[in-house]
């Protein structure tokens, strides 16, 4: 069942995108079964389609600031011609980014044979595909999972890395994660209350929330169970938002200096952090190496993005004792530990959501998973954690893609306790969900 808040967003957006449909005052009513029986879905190929953005598309013909305001002109002309040729009444439409098509709903005129209309549409070279409007019933069990965040179903990375199941047993409660990055939007609705400290270690642009830092924080610790947005890997953990880098533009690279990073690292160490996320990389730096070594010496688990360099992991991911993380597509010789890094749904300022990719995102996943493990066993050291995560990684593949080994949070937790089971078990899942909700 589509969460109520998300469904409302889709209804408004769909109505805004219906070419030729009448404007209806007040709340729109659902079509009757009889109306649906006379409706067909007509798909038109759209090679210029851009990906669906939860705040509106950013580029291409679908570029909008917030809402989807209409069908692109070329597709609209095709749809209008099809409607005229087949005497169809336009109802609504929406771009299907994953399939590269525009899907339009039409109503067949009274008295016409729907099967005949579908057969003729199917033979039309302008039509990518066509089908009847089907009806489905919600099979509501009365049970609910631990979270009610509306975009949870879009977070494939949580399922791929065993985090959805792991949340039945741990959320990272009590673990402090220092995120050294660009500015983090701590006022984002899905980060409110998740940050225990926010500090700036640069002068120019200090304090300004940036895309990269906010995205990393969102992957790690977005609020769970707030009926809004997404769920973080470790929603029970708390963040130290330490800005040591600047991002010149929304799509630009963040930059840091030895000095700003050193200040932030020093603070993270003295602030009793449990985990240190470094979704950054660059040349070897003696001062930073010393500080990272000090953090490890004080049992802070340091996680770093290893980058996409085929010659090896970037600094500081290549330092002894640092957990280096890349995505499944990163060359195997640069490291062993991989986590989701492609098109991961996360947060962007000021209050949006977007899909981001890169080893920075993969590192954030592992930082969150480390928090889940530390909640269950606070005495774990970085070396033991890395070995555990490598040992319990499992193959993941989608849509015919090659299977690759990816970290599995639940399987790692299961090795810490025989009471933790990752296989589907209705009774244990209900009990664990109840325990999780009561602990929030």
Image (cartoon, rainbow, N blue to C red):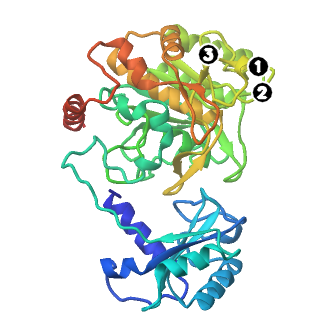
Q: Would you place residue 149 above or below residue 241 in this image?
A: below
Which residue is located at x 56 percent, y 22 percent? Answer: 303
Viewer-side label of 3, 1:
1
* Residue 312 circle label: 1
Q: Disc 2, disc 1: CB below 8 Å?
A: yes
How many other residues sit within 10 Å of disc 1, few (<14), some (14-19) or many (≥20)? Answer: some
| Disc number placed over residue 309 in the picture, else none | 2
* Picture quadrant where residue 222 is located: top left
Residue closer to the observer: 365 or 112: 112
Q: Is residue 378 visible?
A: no
Disc 3 vs disc 2: Cβ atoms closer than 8 Å? no
Q: Secondary structure at mark 3?
A: helix
Q: Looking at the picture, tell me which residue is in the foreground, 198 or 104.
A: 104
Answer with left or right where residue 8 lies relative to residue 337. Answer: left
Q: Of callouts 3 and 1, which one flags the residue occurring earlier in the amino acid sequence?
A: 3
Q: Residue at x 63, y 29 (%)?
A: 328
Write the residue at 22% across / 38% down. 437
The image shows residue 337 at horizontal and vertical percentages of: 59, 20
Give how far apart the Cα atoms at labels 3 and 2 are: 24 Å
Residue 176 drawn at (x, y percent): 41, 27
- Can residue 180 be seen by looking at this rendering? yes
The quarter in which the C terminus is drawn is top left
How busy is the neighbourhood of tag 3: few (under 14 within 10 Å), some, or many (20 plus)? some
Of labels 3 and 2, earlier in sequence is 3
- Marks 3 and 2: which is nearer the front? 2
Picture quarter with the N terminus: bottom left
Q: Which residue is mark 3?
A: 291
């Amino acid at each position: 069942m589509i969460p109520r808040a998300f469904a409302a967003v889709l209804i408004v957006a769909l109505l805004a995108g219906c070419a030729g449909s009448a404007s209806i005052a007040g709340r729109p009513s659902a079509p009757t079964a009889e109306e649906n029986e006379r409706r067909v879905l007509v798909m038109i190929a759209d090679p210029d389609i851009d990906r669906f953005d939860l705040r509106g598309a950013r580029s291409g013909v679908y570029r909008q600031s917030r809402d989807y305001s209409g069908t692109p002109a070329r597709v609209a002309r095709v749809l209008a011609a099809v409607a005229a040729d087949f005497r169809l009444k336009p109802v609504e439409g929406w771009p299907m980014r994953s399939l590269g098509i525009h899907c339009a709903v039409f109503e067949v005129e009274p008295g016409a044979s729907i099967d005949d209309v579908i057969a003729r549409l199917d033979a039309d070279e302008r039509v990518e595909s066509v089908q009847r409007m089907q009806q489905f019933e919600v099979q509501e069990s009365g049970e609910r999972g631990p979270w009610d965040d509306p975009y949870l179903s879009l977070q494939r990375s949580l399922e791929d890395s065993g985090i959805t199941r792991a949340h039945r047993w741990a959320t990272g409660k009590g673990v402090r994660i220092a995120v050294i990055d660009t500015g983090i939007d701590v006022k984002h609705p899905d980060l409110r209350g998740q940050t225990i400290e926010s500090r700036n270690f640069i002068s120019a642009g200090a304090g300004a929330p940036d895309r990269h830092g906010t995205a990393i924080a969102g992957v790690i610790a977005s609020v769970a169970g707030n009926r809004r947005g997404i769920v973080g890997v470790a929603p029970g953990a708390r963040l130290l938002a330490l800005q040591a880098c600047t991002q010149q533009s929304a799509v630009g690279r963040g930059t840091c200096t030895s000095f700003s990073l050193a200040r932030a690292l020093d603070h993270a160490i003295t602030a009793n952090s449990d985990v240190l996320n470094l979704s950054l990389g660059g040349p070897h730096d003696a001062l930073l190496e010393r500080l990272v070594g000090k953090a490890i010496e004080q049992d802070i688990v340091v996680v770093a993005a290893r980058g996409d360099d085929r010659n090896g992991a970037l600094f500081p991911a290549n330092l002894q004792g640092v957990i280096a993380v890349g995505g499944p597509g990163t060359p195997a010789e640069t490291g062993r530990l991989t986590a989701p890094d492609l098109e991961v749904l996360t947060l962007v300022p000021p209050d949006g959501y977007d899909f981001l990719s890169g080893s920075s995102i993969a590192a954030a996943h592992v930082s969150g998973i480390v928090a889940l493990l530390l909640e269950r066993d606070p005495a774990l050291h970085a070396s033991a954690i890395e070995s555990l995560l490598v040992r319990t990684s499992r193959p993941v593949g989608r849509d015919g893609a090659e299977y690759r080994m990816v970290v599995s949070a639940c399987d790692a937790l299961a090795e810490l306790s025989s009471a933790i089971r990752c296989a589907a078990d209705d009774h244990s899942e209900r009990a664990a969900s109840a325990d999780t909700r009561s602990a929030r």
